Image: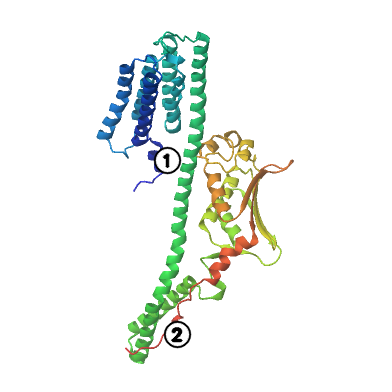
Amino acid sequence: MSEISPTDLVRDARHLRLDTLVRLRWLAVAGQSAAVAGAHLGLGLPLPFGWCFLVIAASSWLNLGLRIRFPASHRLSDDAAVLLLGFDIIQLAALLFLTGGLQNPFALLFLAPVLISATALPPARTLALGLLAVGLATLLALVYRPLPWFANEKLELPFLYVSGVWTAILLGTAFTGVYAWRVAEEARQLAQALAATELVLAREQHLSQLDGLAAAAAHELGTPLATITVVAKELDRQLGPSATPAVAEDLRLLRDQVERCRGILSKLTSLDDDQSGFFETISLSHLVEELVAPQRALGIALEASTRGEGPEPSCRRNPGVLFGLANIVDNAVDFAESRVAIEARWTLERVSLDIRDDGPGFAPDVLLRVGEPYVSTRSAAQAGSEAGTGLGLGLFIAKTLIERSGAQLTLGNAVDPSTGAVVRIVWPRHVFEREAQERRFALPNPAPPLTQARDAPI
């Protein structure tokens, strides 16, 4: 099975639903019909009533055709969405042509299709729709039917006012298009980043579940292994000196293998008090060693130190926290010149972890936007061409996973004359140890020792 990328998870969500455009068009049809009917029948303005409703009916026919042809849940491709929004712009331009052009105050509705496009379509297609709207607005500034007005009166607005309306449409199209695209793009990036985080958590959760499965398997295998032990002892006792050398050798091998299995299962079920919680808890010094060990062969000097007040704290082996811390250490090693230092400190109130390197440090824009997805940890100028090839999700994922455990993560640069980045993670001590203590008190009763199995007659 091929790997699913975070982009694939949100690609369909980015496409516009046909039902959304159809509902918005019905709203536009209702508004246009009410405006035309109110102006003609209510105010008595001499509108080309038939032609206006013919233009409005075109939108209604299109909506009915789309409803018949496609299901409501159908998602439009980018090209199809551009065509439908382009139709809306042209339909509005035709209606404005019949009712005064840019002198009609409803001319600002040109912004609506462009705004919809900016929230859901790529910038190139939004630009094309914006140019179409501005082009038709330019044409309507020059060519249009007179603005309907009361009988025996004529309202002709000066060209300067029409030019102002055209300028407002131009600037409004540009501003709302860019603003809406930026807001929607940040939401899409956040959705992709969260999808990537969920994928990472799912993979790490599978690894964590393996530990639980191993312990459960050891617990279930305890009874049949005890039975094998009993059977081996009974065979040895019954055969005694009459056993052939080959059978005696097989019985010794069987007993040795049973003892070996018993030792393995003892670790998995944590029967020894010193190994209680072997898979579930980890001390702070062991946590630091797990972060440092995979990096020792990369040519960067790694300095790890741990000290504090009182007993050393322990925490639950949290795959998300381990992944987030490992991501930060990987980043420090990648950008370090020659040295990375990891300092673990604890007091009676808090537990802290400082990760320092002697590289160029964080770029100023990263420090200002820390925690946002798709922000590269360092600038490409700081670390060569390869630094700019990442997605910029590492820091976002690491920060999210670590802060989910109750920690506070801060980033900074070393004070002159030192160089490099400094990442500090601080937990309140009771939060750091809370899950480990809960896990320790909630450990299930271990399987009965294998040596307690009763001898059963053969």
Q: Looking at the picture, how far across and down is residue 12, in whole percent?
A: 37, 39
Q: Looking at the picture, how far across and down is residue 168, in whole percent?
A: 51, 19
Pointer 1 and pointer 2: residues touching (CB < 8 Å)? Answer: no
Query: Label 2: which residue?
Result: 452
Secondary structure of residue under mark 2: helix
Quarter occupied by residue 125: top left
Q: Which residue lies furthest to the left in this view?
A: 68
Instruction: Give left or right: position of 403 versus 137.
Output: right
Q: Looking at the picture, how far across and down is residue 78, in whole percent?
A: 37, 30
Q: Earlier in the sequence, mark 1 or mark 2?
A: 1
How many angstroms separate mark 1 from mark 2 (CA)? 56 Å
Task: Check the picture and name the quadrant holding the C terminus.
Answer: bottom left
Residue 150 versus residue 310: which sits nearer the camera?
A: 150
User: As displayed, is residue 169 above or below residue 7?
Assistant: above
- Tell me which residue sits at (46%, 72%) in the image: 264
The label nearer to you, 1 versus 2, is 1
- Tell me which residue sits at (54%, 61%) in the image: 317
Q: Can residue 395 be seen in this view?
A: yes
